[in-house]
Amino acid sequence: MSYKTIPIVLLLSLSGCSSMITERFANNLGNAILSQTDPEVAAASIPTFMVMMDSLVLDAPKNPTILSASANLNGAYASLFASSNAQAKQLTEKSLQQARTAICTEIAAICSRSNLNLEQFQAILASVDAANIDLLYALGTAWAGWIQSHSDDWDALAQVPKVEAVMNRVVELDEQFEWGRGHLYLAVINSQLPPALGGKPAIGRMHFEKAIEISEGQDLIAKVEFARQYARLMFDQELHDQLLNEVITAKTTVITLNLSNAVAKQQAKQLLNTSKEYFEE
């Protein structure tokens, strides 16, 4: 049997499987990508896996587990490997739509109105319990990715407070979920502007440090973003270079962070190479 036929055989074999088996396959597919140690292998593999996930979604268009897995996969490819901003926009649009559909199947109130103000939205989030934290986190990450790819659109940027509200609720429910990445998203959101322009980098630093503490330094992207978002904003070269050198020399053991950490090491080297140029401008 040619290896090229394996995905098709897998899909055909899944057509008669139970929903539980299909959900497990969708989750395992995502974990297989996250466990890759070579970003180039992941970049070449993910498009095929996205097509496979599309097939699962077509078979179960209202299954929240499968929709979230697909949303996560499309969002990951958009943020890590998209070849253009146009492709990133297309993929994050799909990711956000799937993540919204997933959570709306469980919490209809979130989708009852499209024009909820922040206070109304926060009130609905308060009713979300820990049983649905995975769907809530998937919505937050997909939404953040969509905003990033649409950073040239003021209407998109105006939605940042709602993403912040989602991640605040994730942290309230379980701050250790996904290695503390709820804190990481809050850190980045609060480190976009200096204090003089209304930013809250001190709060951002607190969230960065909490994310690093929760993952016990295993999630290297937290240190990369700490350097990129906070240290550069505050013009702290000593902290910037220290964090990046720690990433470059780190030895991690969490398999599902392999891909993220491999990309983090690449980005750390790139940022460190431009450190002198950036801080001596």
Image: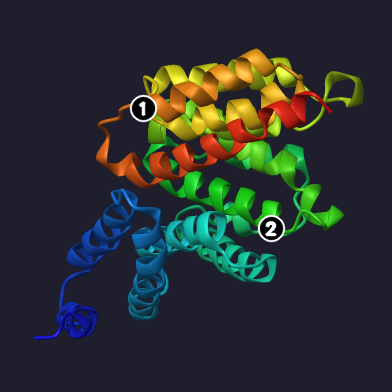
**Looking at the image, which residue is at 65% across and 67% down?**
84
Residue 112: image x %, image y %? 64, 59
Residue reaching furthest to the left? 1
| Snapshot quadrant of residue 13 | bottom left
Residue 133: image x %, image y %? 43, 41
Question: Which one is earlier in the sequence, the residue at label 1 or at label 2?
Answer: 2
Tell me if residue 22 comes above or below residue 174 in the rendering: below
Q: Which residue is mark 2?
A: 149
Marking on residue 22 = none
Query: Is residue 191 in sight in this rendering?
Result: no
Identity, as a three-letter code, of the amino acid under mark 2? Ser
Q: Nearer the viewer, residue 183 or 229?
A: 229
Tell me if residue 11 comes above or below residue 240 in the rendering: below
Q: Is residue 24 left or right of residue 58?
A: left
Residue 235: image x %, image y %? 76, 20
Tell me if residue 99 comes above or below residue 192 in the rendering: below
Alpha-carbon distance for marks 1 and 2?
27 Å
Q: Nearer the viewer, residue 47 or 57?
A: 47
What crowding class fits label 1: few (fewer than 14 Cα within 10 Å), some (14-19), or many (20 or more)?
A: many
| Snapshot quadrant of residue 246 | top left
Identity, as a three-letter code, of the amino acid under mark 1? Gln
Residue 171: image x %, image y %? 51, 28
Q: Quadrant of the N terminus?
A: bottom left
Q: Nearer the viewer, residue 249 or 63?
A: 249
Tell me if residue 245 comes above or below residue 129 in the rendering: above
**Looking at the image, which residue is at 48% across and 55% down?**
76
What crowding class fits label 2: few (fewer than 14 Cα within 10 Å), some (14-19), or many (20 or more)?
A: many
Q: Which residue is mark 1?
A: 218
Q: Is residue 146 left or right of residue 47?
A: right
Query: Is residue 117 in sight in this rendering?
Result: yes
